[in-house]
Image (tube, rainbow, N blue to C red):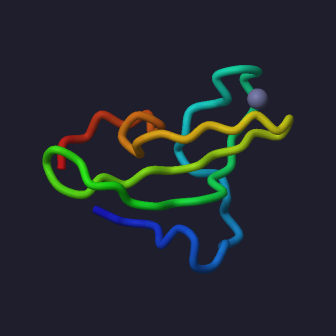
Amino acid sequence: MHENPLGTARSATTTLDLESCMACGHLTEVTGCFQLPGLDGPERYLRTRCMLGHTFVGPEFALRAESRAS
Ligand SMILES: [Zn+2]
């Protein structure tokens, strides 16, 4: 299990395994990351923005396309 330290230093690879923009289908970029208390502990939320400026904020598990159980 690898974890990207989002928010510290933007590495050369900004292409995370995120879904494409829900509005236009372009690639999205993670622009922010924060945690909110959830029912089962703190949940990580991501803020993403696509090339055309559509922004989405949501739980990481919802934005990521992976269905891996931790
Ligand atoms: Zn978009």
- Residue 35 appears at what percent x and percent y? 38, 60
Residue at figure coordinates x 71%, y 20% from the top left: 23
Q: Give the number of marks.
A: 0
Looking at the rendered image, the quarter that the N terminus falls into is bottom left
Closer to the camera in the image, 66 or 57: 57
Q: Residue furthest left?
A: 40
The answer to which of 67 and 44 lies nearer the viewer is 44
| Residue occupying the far right of the picture | 52
Lateral position of residue 12 relative to residue 41, left or right: right
Query: Is 64 situated above or below 42?
Result: above
Specify the quadrant of the image occupied by residue 12: bottom right
64 above or below 31?
above
Residue located 72% across and 23% down the image: 25
State which quadrant residue 54 falls in: top right
Residue appearing at x 66%, y 57% in the figure: 31
Apparent side of residue 9 relative to residue 5 in the rendered image (left or right): right
Relative placement, left or right, of 58 versus 10 is: left
The answer to whether 66 is drawn above or below residue 33 in the figure is above
Image quadrant of ligand 1 equals top right
Q: Residue at x 26, y 54 (%)?
A: 37
Q: Position of residue 67 (x, y in %)?
A: 29, 34
Q: Position of residue 33 (x, y in %)?
A: 51, 60
